[in-house]
Amino acid sequence: MRELARQGELTHSTVSEVIAGNRAPTHDFCVAVARALGEPEADVLWRAGLLEDRPIKPDEPWMEEAIYELRQLTPQQREHALALIKLVKDGALVAYSARRKKK
C-alpha cells in the first residue's frame, strides 16, 4: 500500500481507508491509482463504481469483427446499422419483437 500511495502521490492513510472500505474512492483517487498501476483510467473508475458502463477495450475479439463488418457497408448502410444498434441498446427492438410474437 505504501508503494501504491507513493507512486500515486497519495497519502498512505487515504489508500488504506479506501481499500478498507472506510472511504469512497474519488475520481482523482482512481486516476492516481490507474497511473500508478499503469492501468487504463476508465477500467479503474468502472471498478470503483464511478462509471456506469464497462469500458470497451479495442482489442476485445468481437470488436475487431464488428469493425470489419461495418467497413464493408456503404455510408448509408452504416447509418442504418448504427440506428439498429441504438434500438437494440434502448430495448426498443426487443419490445417490438415481443409484441410481434404475441400476435
Image (cartoon, grey):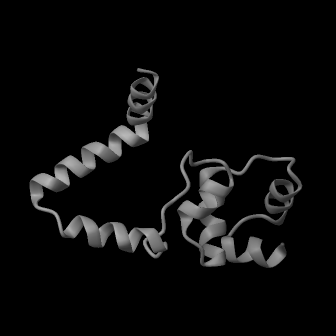
Q: What residue sits 18% from the left and 55% below the top?
A: 78
30 left or right of 100 in image: right
Which of 16/77 is in front? 77
Q: Position of residue 92 (x, y in %)?
A: 39, 31
Q: What residue sits 79% from the left and 79% below the top?
A: 3
Which of 25/69 is in front? 69
- Name the quarter where the C terminus is drawn: top left
Q: What residue sits 38% from the left and 35% below the top?
A: 93
Q: Residue furthest top?
A: 103
10 left or right of 51 in image: right
Is 11 rendered above or below residue 85?
A: below
Q: Position of residue 21 (x, y in %)?
A: 85, 50
34 left or right of 15 in image: left
Which of 93/34 is in front? 93
Total labels drawn: 0
Which of 72/1 is in front? 72
- Name the quarter where the N terminus is drawn: bottom right
Q: Position of residue 95 (x, y in %)?
A: 44, 28
Is 45 rendered above or below residue 52?
A: below
Q: Position of residue 58 (x, y in %)?
A: 43, 71
Report which quarter residue 37 is drawn in.
bottom right
Q: Residue furthest front?
A: 103
Q: What residue sits 59% from the left and 63% below the top?
A: 43
Report which quarter residue 18 is drawn in.
bottom right
75 left or right of 21 in image: left
